[in-house]
Image: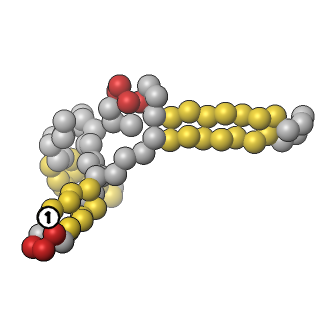
Amino acid sequence: MANEETRKHDMAFEVDFNNHETVDISIKLDLTERVTVKTREAGRLDIKHLAEIQHMPAYADEFWKLYDGDTLLAEWRTPEATP
């Protein structure tokens, strides 16, 4: 869903009306999965499923403070956004 071009055709749905009260819905998703495959000795394959890329939203401020009334509970810098 992160790629604008593939979003145009990676999801579709169909609705079949059964009667005035119920419908059947079919949802079709073109899914991918991040995987690395490495060839080892004697033709053995090492397959590793990778975590999905987490895109960080742009934050309004770089530095944040959390208070409970006048008590400072926490402070932190926001992570840098990933492209």
Between 33 and 81, the one lying in front of the other is 33
Return the x and y of residue 71 as percentages of the image width and height. Answer: 26, 60
Relative horizontal placement of residue 25, taking residue 41 as reference (left or right): right
User: Which residue is painted at 33% across and 55% down in the image?
Assistant: 69
Look at mark 1 in the image and give the residue it sits on.
Answer: 39
Question: Which scheme is used to colour this image of the protein?
Answer: secondary structure
Return the x and y of residue 18 as percentages of the image width and height. Answer: 85, 38
Return the x and y of residue 31 as percentages of the image width and height. Answer: 42, 45
User: Which residue is painted at 60% across and 41% down in the image?
Assistant: 27
Relative horizontal placement of residue 52, taking residue 46 as reference (left or right): right
Most extreme residue toward the front, as rendered? 42
Most extreme residue toward the bottom, as rendered? 42
Residue 73 visible from this viewpoint: no
Secondary element at tag 1 = strand
Q: Quadrant of the N terminus?
A: top left
User: Which residue is painted at 81% across and 34% down in the image?
Assistant: 17
Most extreme residue toward the left, as rendered? 41
Relative to residue 59, is residue 66 depicted above or below? below
Relative to residue 5, is residue 53 depicted above or below? below
Relative horizontal placement of residue 27, taking residue 45 as reference (left or right): right
Relative horizontal placement of residue 77, taking residue 4 as reference (left or right): left
Return the x and y of residue 5 as percentages of the image width and height. Answer: 35, 25
Between 71 and 82, the one lying in front of the other is 82
User: Which amino acid, by three-letter code, is at mark 1?
Assistant: Thr
Q: Quadrant of residue 39?
A: bottom left
User: Which residue is painted at 26% across and 56% down in the image?
Assistant: 35
Q: Quadrant of the C terminus?
A: top left
Relative to residue 72, is residue 40 depicted above or below? below
Relative to residue 40, is residue 82 depicted above or below? above
- Count of numbered circles on the image: 1
